[in-house]
Amino acid sequence: MSILNRRGVLLGLGATGVVAGCSNALGTNGAAKIDARVNATMNYLYSTQPGTRALRDKSAGMLVMPVVTEVGFGVGGSYGRGALQIGDVTVDYYSAAQASIGLQLGAQQYAHVLFFMTESALSGFRRSPGWAAGADVEYTLNNQGENFSAETTTSLSPVIAVVFGQAGLIAGASVEGTKYTRIIP
């Protein structure tokens, strides 16, 4: 591994650590705070993108990440905490972390929900010690819920990610390359 690559990895991990200390850290009563944020996030999603209710109804489970904070200045990272729900009941809590390097400058917060459309996708996620979102995830970024609902709810993808609520000054929001790890809040 070259020195440049090592520095990039170390800087990316450092940036992710800095982001973890940002305003979405939960402190004490972590589970209650995560649950409250998850409920508020899902209420917002259903009211602004009604087509996502059909995704919820068809999914085996969903991972809700109510606040993901992302910062980047050449090297960047993102961090957030959320809950895995099966049948609208929280069964586990997870953190999401991502490190990046490249042409980037700014900071933002956003929410995302991963809808596990098959039992095998959900069980694979739950069995994994650290699951990374990759090529098997279909992204839905449209803010007009009714426009995407027809194509998304008929998708054969095992996992559908809905990214929404972006606020800040950085281009784009993605969950690809994000590592999800089970936590005890």
Image (spheres, grey):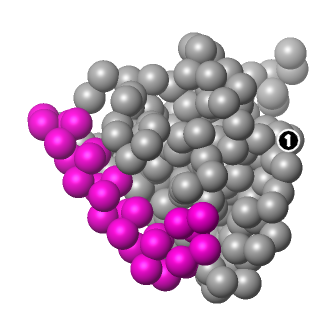
Q: How many marks?
A: 1
* Badge 1 density bin: few <14, some 14–19, many ≥20, Cα 10 Å: few
Report whether residue 74 is seen: no
Q: In the depicted view, which residue is nearer to us: 5 or 168?
A: 168
Q: In the depicted view, which residue is nearer to us: 107 or 148?
A: 148
- In the rendered image, the residue lying farthest to the left is 28
Tell me the element at label 1: loop
Q: For the point 21% across and 37% down, which residue is it?
A: 30
In the shown orientation, is residue 57 left or right of residue 100?
left
Indicate the quadrant containing the C terminus: top left, top right, bottom left or bottom right: top left
Q: For the point 38% across and 63% down, which residue is it?
A: 41
Indicate the quadrant containing the N terminus: top left, top right, bottom left or bottom right: top right
The image quadrant that residue 80 belongs to is: top left
**Percent x, y for residue 21?**
34, 42
* Magenta span of residues: 28-54
Above/below status of 70 relative to 94: below
Q: Amino acid at mark 1?
A: Ala
Above/below status of 117 relative to 140: above
The image quadrant that residue 146 belongs to is: bottom right
Residue linked to disc 1: 135
